[in-house]
Amino acid sequence: MSTPHDGRPPSSTTTPSRPDSPPDSRPDSRQDTRSGTEKKGGRRTCGSRSWAAATPSDPADASRPASPSDPPIPKPPPTPSSTAAPPAPSHSNKKGFDLNAIETVLVTHLHADHFGGIVFLILDGQFRRRTIDLTVVGPPGTERRLNEAMEASFPGSTEVKRRFVVRVVEHRERTAWATHRFTALPFEVRHAAGAPSYALRVKNAESGSCIAYSGDTEWTDALLDAAQGTDLFLCEGYAHHPVRWHMDLTTLQTHRHRLETRHLLLTRLSPTALEADLSTWDVAHDALTLTV
């Protein structure tokens, strides 16, 4: 969770399409370089969902100009939010996000898929001549773990003198941390990460709009306090049935009526959760833009 330097949400753009990679000699298992999805027998899979792709039955058809009578090639549906590593800085830049404009990063817990991207954010700023100081707000031990991740990824990187300062602030349970743009309030939750894990509640200082994020956690009543009165509650929906340290949809459903939020949105669904009946849930997907 990060905040831009200019106070405005970054614009949403669409990544330009580009041709598929050359055909593989094994048509039943090819990698689509555009989306990272796997093509199997003319069908592209996105997690547990798929969409049919038009594949020529004759190699000569591949070079034949499109005819008005040809059926349109269907577009893939948005990829539901699933488990993934943080995006590379170059990917974020292509999406229209100016990473050098980020002033603050809020961290829920110290697992690499939630804070590891900060390493690349710092290195990206170093090489693109960033001058705006960066503040990282995270659980106790964040500074040590961040330095260890920096050294493991890029030995010697913690000794580099940069044009900007990286300042680390630690969460304190249910104690607000504020800037002139927002106020963040952490709520300790149940997720083993070698340090306390938190759900975060963030309120915009100007508009008063408020969002909360569960982070990774199994059910705890602390989520009721984090979500209370929010415009948007982003909640993990990792599994369909109970699993330790993560939120499952079965348990979440039993507490759903207790969450006092205007909009509950599931995120970080595992492949098994994506195979469940999600018709009664609102699920985040890639490139989703929301206004609160």
Image (cartoon, rainbow, N blue to C red):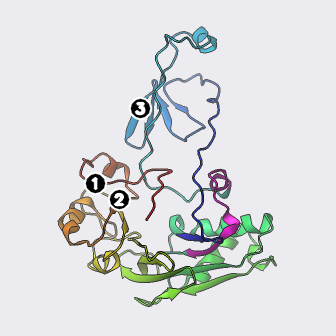
Q: Secondary structure at mark 3?
A: strand
The image shows residue 238, relative to residue 140, as above or below, that is: above
Provide the residue designation for mark 1.
281
Q: Is residue 273 left or right of residue 153?
A: left
Q: Tags 2 and 1 in contact by the CB under 8 Å rule?
A: yes
Q: Amino acid at mark 2?
A: Leu
Q: Residue at x 31, y 81 (%)?
A: 225
Tag nearer the camera, 3 or 1: 1
x, y percentage for residue 46? 44, 41
Q: CA distance from mark 2 to mark 1?
A: 7 Å
Residue range (magenta): 90-105
x, y percentage for residue 165? 73, 81
Provide the residue designation for mark 3.
51
Q: Amino acid at mark 3?
A: Trp
Provide the residue designation for mark 2.
266
Q: Is residue 117 left or right of residue 271?
A: right
Q: Residue at x 68, y 54 (%)?
A: 90
